[in-house]
């Protein structure tokens, strides 16, 4: 079972966990120190399993810890994923810098001086 936590208001930075259908869980993870909210997504078959509450406990603990540690980096990482052993973070790529427009040379203002 793989669970992904995606920050609300952002798109996934990596492919979603492998599954035919995905289910978005109703209980998000909140950062206790700020307003960051992460929505949880996993495969439909894992989500409707009878033992989901017990099987997902370790996954959710690891994701909560990753979100709390992400507070120190100002939540720049918008996509976490765990399989219960390790948490993988997927950062959104930085947009390329926009080039500054070329400076145009301007002539000094003309003065109407009569001599």
Image: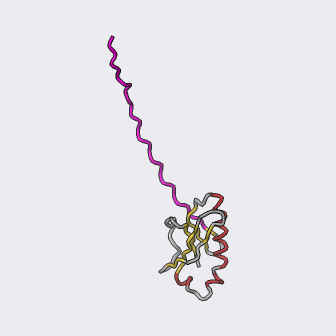
> Where is 85 relative to 115, above or below?
below
Whether residue 92 is in magenta: the answer is yes
Question: Residue at point 63% right, 80% down?
Answer: 56
Question: Residue at point 34% right, 22% down?
Answer: 110
Q: Along the horizontal axis of the image, is 42 left or right of 87?
A: left
Q: Position of residue 114 (x, y in %)?
A: 32, 13
Question: Residue at point 58% right, 62% down?
Answer: 77
Q: Nearer the viewer, residue 35 or 44?
A: 35
Q: How is the image coloured?
A: secondary structure
Residue 40, located in which quarter of the rendered image? bottom right
Q: Position of residue 84 (x, y in %)?
A: 64, 75
Q: Position of residue 91 (x, y in %)?
A: 55, 61
Residue 71, located in which quarter of the rendered image? bottom right
The span picked out in magenta is 88-115
Q: How many marks?
A: 0
Q: Position of residue 109 (x, y in %)?
A: 37, 25
> Where is 113 relative to 37, above or below?
above
Whether residue 107 is in magenta: the answer is yes
Q: Nearer the viewer, residue 37 or 97?
A: 37
Where is the C terminus found, in terms of image quarters? top left
Q: Residue furthest bottom?
A: 50
> Where is 70 relative to 17, above or below?
above
Q: Main secondary structure of the magenta part?
A: loop
């Amino acid at each position: 079972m793989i669970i992904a936590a995606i920050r609300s208001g952002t798109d996934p930075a990596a492919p979603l966990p492998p599954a035919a259908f995905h289910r978005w869980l109703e209980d998000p993870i909140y950062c206790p120190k700020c307003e960051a909210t992460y929505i949880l997504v996993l495969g439909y078959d894992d989500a409707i399993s009878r033992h989901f509450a017990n099987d997902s406990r370790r996954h959710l603990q690891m994701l909560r810890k990753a979100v709390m540690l992400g507070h120190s980096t100002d939540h720049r990482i918008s996509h976490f994923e765990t399989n219960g052993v390790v948490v993988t973070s997927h950062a959104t790529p930085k947009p390329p810098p926009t080039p500054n427009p070329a400076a145009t040379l301007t002539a000094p203002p003309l003065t109407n001086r009569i001599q």
